[in-house]
Image (spheres, rainbow, N blue to C red):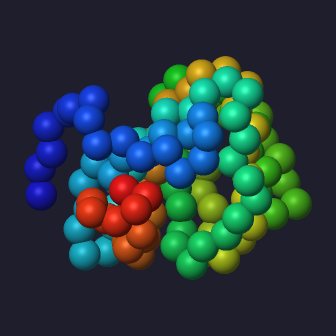
Amino acid sequence: MFATHTRQGYAEPVEGIRMKTLVHGEKSLLARFELTKGASLPAHSHAQEQTGYLVSGKIILHIGDDSFEAGPGDSWCIGGDVEHRAEILENSVAIEVFSPVRKDYLPGNSNA
């Protein structure tokens, strides 16, 4: 699967947090998140492992009992079924991989 860059196709599952699935295969899915300063990603969990990389900005990630202030170039891995949330300190861009595929993030679904 190949994808070309476009500014279209973003969803806003939470106010101030826009996301777009870039590509996916049978076992993984790659998504881009645009995060607005002051927004919060509420605590949640999902079965998929989630590996992320902060391209720009600054966020605080709360993963289980740990917290981490991430800046450009920092990365993380969140195990499946582990509760996590985020506070957005600056406008930020994150790239994340989900495995296995999050079916709710596939194009054509409500969050994709």
Measured along the vertical axis of the image, is residue 80 above or below residue 14? below
Measured along the vertical axis of the image, is residue 112 above or below residue 46? above
Residue at far right of view: 65
Which residue is painted at 27% across and 60% down in the image?
107
Q: Which of 8 and 56 is in front in this view?
A: 8
Count numbered badges in the picture: 0
Q: Can residue 57 be seen in this view?
A: no
Q: Nearer the viewer, residue 72 or 33?
A: 33
Which residue is painted at 42% across and 69% down in the image?
104
Considering the image in quadrants, where does the N terminus appear? bottom left
* Residue 102 picture location, percent across and down: 42, 70
Which residue is painted at 33% across and 52% down in the image?
21
28 relative position to 67: left or right = left
14 relative position to 89: left or right = left
Q: Is residue 92 visible?
A: yes
* Residue 12 picture location, percent across and down: 49, 44
* Residue 17 picture location, percent across and down: 56, 39
Measured along the vertical axis of the image, is residue 26 above or below residue 34? below
* Residue 65 picture location, percent across and down: 88, 60
Which residue is painted at 60% across and 34% down in the image?
16
100 relative position to 108: left or right = right
Measured along the vertical axis of the image, is residue 4 above or below residue 64? above
Question: Looking at the rendering, which quadrant does residue 47 occupy?
Answer: bottom right
65 relative position to 5: left or right = right
Considering the image in quadrants, where does the C terminus appear? bottom left
